[in-house]
Amino acid sequence: AQRVTQPEKLLSVFKGAPVELKCNYSYSGSPELFWYVQYSRQRLQLLLRHISRESIKGFTADLNKGETSFHLKKPFAQEEDSAMYYCALSGSGYSTLTFGKGTMLLVSP
Amino acid sequence: DGGITQSPKYLFRKEGQNVTLSCEQNLNHDAMYWYRQDPGQGLRLIYYSQIVNDFQKGDIAEGYSVSREKKESFPLTVTSAQKNPTAFYLCASSPGQGAYEQFFGPGTRLTVL
């Protein structure tokens, strides 16, 4: 069974502070990991995926297989980063996507 | 704004009534999904379909039914057997199943009175 854990329901930081949204997963094989974001009044959308190794809107995430983690990081938070963030996992083959419960990020001025 | 659409945006129904939520996509995607989003619960998979005329149960399929008669359409029926139907429902599609990006609709908020 595949499982995704986001331990923080809410993360509140000030503008310019570093941000780390935690994501841990449980899966026996080689997973594909994603971060999805939902801004206020907008659709849920893909932020980044680990295989692309991109930095999107200043966010990065590294897959740590030893710690089974895929934490999302940004060195300097902006107010427009305030949103709900979901970590998601897809297993090998034709697996469905399993989402964590989400972390609400609030960036204050 | 094309892509994936859901209607209606808000839906109110009396307890004991079945209700059908619409989901349409013009992305030519093979796979489609229905999720339920509740506060503090994240997204939970209700049903998914990899191809026309085929669909599988997700993690919380009880009290729901779907059909996939056309590639672009994947309607969800919330039946009277669903014990707690009031929720926000999201539809998504992807080119295939597995490690593809999923594209989400705007959602339908269902309230059962």
Image (tube, coloured by chain):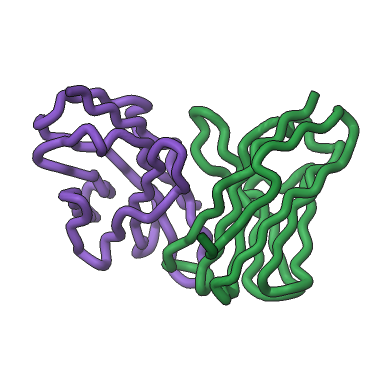
Chain colours: A purple, B green
**x and y percent of residue A3 in the render?**
44, 46
Quadrant for residue B24, please give it: bottom right
Residue at image point 61% right, 66% down? B25
Horizontally, is A95 left or right of A78 in the view? right
Horizontally, is A98 left or right of B79 in the view? left
Residue at image point 43% right, 60% down? A90
Q: Name the quarter where the C terminus of chain A is drawn.
A: top left
Q: Total marks drawn?
A: 0
**x and y percent of residue A24 in the render?**
32, 43
Q: Residue furthest front?
A: B1
**x and y percent of residue A58 in the render?**
16, 49
Quadrant for residue A48, please give it: bottom left
**x and y percent of residue A88 in the render?**
40, 51
Residue at image point 36% right, 62% down? A32
Residue at image point 47% right, 72% down? A93
Residue B64's place in the image compared with B2, above or below, is: above
Horizontally, is A8 left or right of B37 in the view? left
Horizontally, is B36 left or right of A89 in the view? right
Tell which of A16 and A98 is nearer to you.
A16
